Image (cartoon, rainbow, N blue to C red):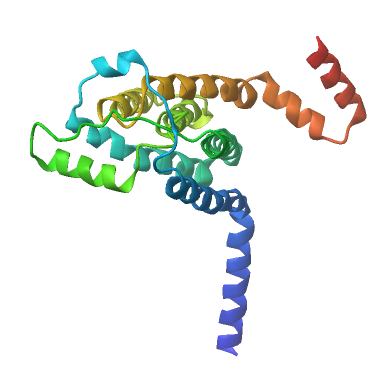
Amino acid sequence: MYNHKKRKFTISYLKGLIYQYRHAWILSYLAIYMVWFCYVEQTVQKKFHIITMPVDLTIPFCEYFIIPYLLWFAYVAYGISYFFFRNTKDYYKLCVFLFTGMTVFLIISTIYPNGHYLRPEEFARDNWCTKLVSWLYQADTPTNLFPSIHVYNSLGVHIALTHSACYKDKKICKRISFILCYFIVLSTLFLKQHSVFDVITAFCMAAVMYYLVYCHAYQKILAFLRPDKRKKRRVVHDLRM
């Protein structure tokens, strides 16, 4: 009898958790992204369009930027996890922002293979940072680079944090986020992972997605998807204006 009640309680508890965190479904996109990304990484090796700008040659290599570059993984994971548990609306906005840009990146990489030859052939110094950079170079080929997802996702997380009511009074956290985002952007250039062109296109795409997700356009799209016909007519009229 006790076991039956315990089992019933466990099943009810699990159902409650599944319902409470049902918004986790959108994270299944990451599996699609990884499969697609690995495919373009393996297929694009030698034949690609070279993407560089003259200013790239003036930027020196600095292995110490590997620190903010790797912190990117924790930064993005923190942003998604924080809103996953704290604010579902901000969580969906961030996921839409990130995943839309990541999909655009994959489409570009598939139909327009690209890369560069900016990486140094050898390192001037031998330290733990250069060892990490060497590992990074082996794991990540200098192909499929624009727009830079490192830059784009960093901008996405910072925008999400600064526009969330959860961080309204957390000025120090916002400043830390800005500093980390700033150095992550720089790290892509000083590690020769990306061209300035990759960074510029990431900013451009982030600007477009910022308008669509965090400005009035987002509310108009949501209203258009609702069944109220009068609201749809009003939205169509506003879009025409």
- Image quarter in which the C terminus is found: top right
Horizontal and vertical percent for residue 128?
12, 42
Name the quadrant containing residue 153: top left
Q: Above or below — where is 29 with respect to 152?
A: below
- Corner quadrant of residue 64: top left
User: 155 and 230: which one is in front?
Assistant: 155
Q: Residue at x 82, y 21 (%)?
A: 235
Q: Residue at x 31, y 30 (%)?
A: 117
Which residue is the extreme one toward the right?
A: 229
Q: Nearer the viewer, residue 208 or 48?
A: 48
Query: Could you say where residue 180 lies in the image, as x and y percent from the top left?
Result: 32, 28
- Relative to 180, say whether 137 is above or below: below
Place of residue 15 in the rendered image (x, y in percent of width and height, measured from the top left) = 63, 66
- At 52% from the left edge and 28% from the top edge, which residue is drawn? 165
Residue that appears at 91% across and 29% down: 229
Task: State the quadrant of the N terminus.
Answer: bottom right
**Residue 48 x, y percent position in the rendering:** 44, 34
Q: Give 173 or 109, whichever is nearer the viewer.
A: 109
Above or below, 30 against 149 in this view is below
211 is higher (above) or lower (below) than 114: above
